[in-house]
Amino acid sequence: MSTLVKSITLEEFLQLPETKPTSEYIDGKISQKPMPQGEHSRLQGKLVATINEVAETPKIALAFPELRCVFGGAAIVPDIAVFRWERIPREPSGRIANRFATHPDWVIEILSPDQSQAKVLRNLLHCSQNGTELGWLIFPEEASILTIFPNQRVEMLTGTDPLPIFSNIDLSLTVEQVFSWLTL
């Protein structure tokens, strides 16, 4: 006996109550993100702080953890969404908007244990296809970072490889430096 599953639209998904951990909607399907664990949480916190330390005061960009972004027919919640300053959604008063109905400029995902690599990569490719300039997929177990550029050009970086960052952000990081944050 098969069970029929009613398909849901993006608009219907956005009306559903929030879940913990958060849910995403892409390709007509709802999926729940895994609950972050130690390495994931540490990398996410350090990356947000490091990016914002050099990009926020000069009003170049702003990094947001776990921000729902609705664009291209999907609602995704990247581990880190970075927006160029002029693209940060704002209310008419100038305050930051609660709803971000646009693509991030830079997306960072950190693969959690038991998380589907294919699903996370699909989200990153969706971002790239819809205007995101840069994507990182961090693999803590392999100490490597897959980078995604426009036109879905990808590179796998390890060790002392320098990581691509927006040219106007005064920050240089290597893969090795990022993973050194896991040793306390």
Image (cartoon, rainbow, N blue to C red):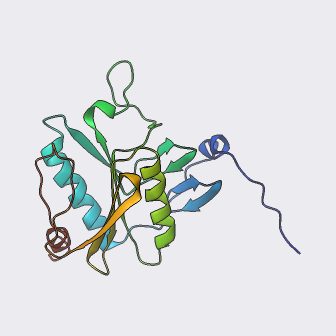
4 left or right, relative to 104: right
* Left or right, residue 163 beside residue 99: left
- Quarter occupied by residue 92: top left
In this rendering, the answer to whether 22 lies above or below 83 is: below
Give the image location of residue 168, x and y in percent: 15, 42
91 is higher (above) or lower (below) than 76 = above
Find residue 37 and report its horizontal and vertical position in percent: 36, 72
Quadrant for the N terminus in the image: bottom right
| Quadrant of the rendered image containing residue 79 | bottom left
User: Left or right: 39 with respect to 121?
Assistant: left
Residue 60 in picture, x, y percent from top left: 19, 37
Question: Residue visible at 19% across and 46% down?
Answer: 52
Count the marks: 0
Q: Nearer the viewer, residue 42 or 148?
A: 148
In the foreground, 91 or 72: 72
Q: Residue at x 64, y 57 (%)?
A: 29
Above or below 6: residue 55:
above
Q: Position of residue 98 (x, y in %)?
A: 43, 35
Task: State which quarter of the image contains the C terminus.
Answer: bottom left
The residue located at (44%, 38%) in the rendering is: 102
Most extreme residue toward the top is 93
Q: Residue furthest bottom?
A: 142
Rendering quarter of residue 173: bottom left
